[in-house]
Amino acid sequence: MEKIEFENLNNRISAFERIKQINEFGQEYWSARDLSSILEYQKWDKFQNVIKKAIESCKNSEQPVENHFLQTGKMVRIGSNTERTIMDYQLSRYACYLIVQNADPSKDVVALGQTYFAIQTRKQEITEMEEYQNLETYEEKRLFLRQELKKTNLQLASAAKDVGVIESIDYAIFQDHGYKGLYGGLSSKDIHFKKGLKPSQKILDHMGSTELAANLFRATQTEEKLKTEKENIKSKKEANQIHLEVGKKVRKAIKDIGGTMPENLPVEESIKKIETKIKKLKK
């Protein structure tokens, strides 16, 4: 992807937010016609093929299609004082995410859309959780993210097993590929050393909320990609490469928004101490 000036990049990313609409129930949605324009598709037929692939991905993810792809009509002007109805879809944020994942990857704007919708979709999932909304302190939110990551890693392990990553040593190598993608080539041992952690200390237990969120995003996106591309993954090597590439994309997203690289984020107090402290307070 060619280098894009930071200001221009921000403007193009914000374009996805500008075309967002709100229906009569207060729910956000995107018009497929508007999205096709942003993604630089000149012909609706070609974009419809992308939508069909996205719908298949939605089915493969066991999500109800009708909740994310609502077929509707849109009035357009075709001449002086003349209008006609053309086919359109009201798309959820998740539907938009699936569409950009299936769109032409050679377009710069598609890569930006992948970054925007992937991050915003996961952020929305977390912030909409009632349990998360009820949390008041940073420590509580950090503990929540750590627990979510623990659950997601179990799901990721299951998805990896389905594509041939079975033995413990294979899974350790698979996980290291994800870390290397997200941490600029650093393995788990390298991260331990850079952050000054002891061999007995787990990296995840000493991450702050920002770093946990980045790793949660890496894990969820890898799990979904392994599931949706299950039939095409022929080896452990391919699964490792997918984890590496997802990690790289998350790292690039952090860079694009001007964030701090995860290896440079500070080490925080053990999450186990936080958990003990919160339990005592609740008692």
Image (cartoon, rainbow, N blue to C red):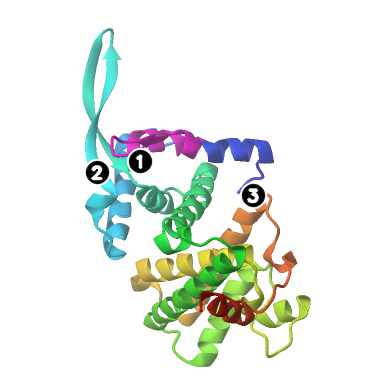
Residue 258 shows which numbered tag?
Answer: none
Q: In which quadrant of the rendered view does residue 271 lie?
A: bottom right
Residue 256 shows which numbered tag?
Answer: 3
Label 1 – label 2 distance at C-alpha: 10 Å
Q: Earlier in the sequence, mark 3 or mark 2?
A: 2
Q: Could you classify mark 1 by the number of other residues whose Cα lies within 10 Å: few (under 14), some (14-19), or many (20 or more)?
A: many
User: Which secondary structure, mark 2?
Assistant: strand
In the image, residue 52 above or below residue 186: above
Q: Which residue is mark 2?
A: 70
Q: Residue at x 54, y 46 (%)?
A: 112
Q: Is residue 44 left or right of residue 184?
A: left
Which amino acid type is marked by label 3? Asp
Q: Which residue is mark 1?
A: 29
Q: Earlier in the sequence, mark 1 or mark 2?
A: 1
Q: Could you classify mark 2 by the number of other residues whose Cα lies within 10 Å: few (under 14), some (14-19), or many (20 or more)?
A: some
Q: Confirm or deny contact between disc 1 and disc 2 (CB under 8 A).
A: yes
> Residue 65: image x %, image y %?
24, 54
Q: Which residues are magenta?
A: 15-39
> Residue 50: image x %, image y %?
34, 48
